[in-house]
Structures are given as structure tokens and as C-alpha cells.
Amino acid sequence: MKLGELKPPSGSRKGRKRIGRGPASGRGKTCGRGHKGQKARAGGKTRPGFEGGQMPLQRRLPKRGFTNVYNEKKVATASMNVGELARFGDGATIDLNFLKERKAVKEKGIRYLRVLGGGELNAALTVRAHYFTPQARAKIEGAGGKAEAE
């Protein structure tokens, strides 16, 4: 038996509904759309929440609370694995400005640096970041370096 010869059990797959194939099919003439009206027309769909011109529910209900979605500050964060920091060599002091100068962080507006624990580290580095995972801190200090939180 080959993979291409597999077939589903008979009766487990239902055929698609063929509409507009004459009155004997049960889906002829209006093809299940009824007589006239918006939904009988081609392209006659309405957006979600539309109630035929009646005031929609989401506009009828009172609004509560405060939202500041227009003025919220999105804080961009750069995440680096410990293994990626190893390439900068022994004794290097790594912080966000250092990574931007070396083009290791290319996105604009990055204000915070996170150091994650992926990869291996053999070089003794001084890393200044805003956040360290416990694994990253252990690997940096285990290699003889310093993990300084800003």
C-alpha cells in the first residue's frame, strides 16, 4: 500500500452542494437564496454587526471606562541570546548603544535590551541590559562575566 492509494472510508466524506442545477435538484432557480432582497443579490453581504439600518447593538450599549489607545507609548525591546553576545570577544562591555553601533540592533526606536539564555558563552563579558532571564544571568556569571541591570 502506498500513500497515494489511501482513500477515506465510504460515507465519511460528504460531496459539495451543487446549486443551480434545475428544479429536480432541490436547489434550482433561486439556488437557496430566497426571493429578492439584499442577500439574494450578487455581492449582497453585510459587514459584521450590521442590523439592516437599525442602530447596532455595539452602538446602543453604554460605554464605560477610559482608553488611551491613541496616545499609548509602544516600548520597543531588543532581545538577544547569550550565544549571540559571545561573538564580541573577551572583556567587551555590551550595552544597547554598543549593539546599535555594531549594527547588531537595526530597528529604530529600540529603548530596552533583554538578554535571553539561548546558546553557549565562553567569553567573560560585562553585559548591561534592562532585563536578564535567570539562565542568561547564570551563563554570563558562569563564564566569569558580569550581568548588570540598568
Image (cartoon, helix red, strand yellow):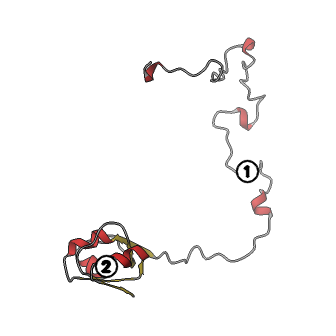
Vertical order, 103 against 92 (above or below): above
- Callout 2: 10 Å neighbours few (<14), some, many (20+)? some
- Name the residue: 31% across, 79% down: 142
Which amino acid does the dot numbered 2 rest on? Gly
Which residue bears the numbered disc 2? 142
Left/right of residue 112 with respect to residue 21 in the rendered view: left
Q: Are marks 2 and 1 in contact (CB under 8 Å)?
A: no
Quadrant in the picture for residue 63 = bottom right
Q: Position of residue 86 (x, y in %)?
A: 24, 72
- Callout 1: 10 Å neighbours few (<14), some, many (20+)? few
Q: Nearer the viewer, residue 119 or 56?
A: 119
Quadrant in the picture for residue 123 = bottom left
Residue 47 visible (yes or no): yes
N-terminal of the pair, mark 2 or mark 1, is 1
Which amino acid does the dot numbered 1 rest on? Phe
**Disc 2 from disc 1: Cα separation:** 61 Å
Which residue bears the numbered disc 1? 50
Q: Position of residue 148 (x, y in %)?
A: 36, 87
Q: Nearer the viewer, residue 144 or 66?
A: 144
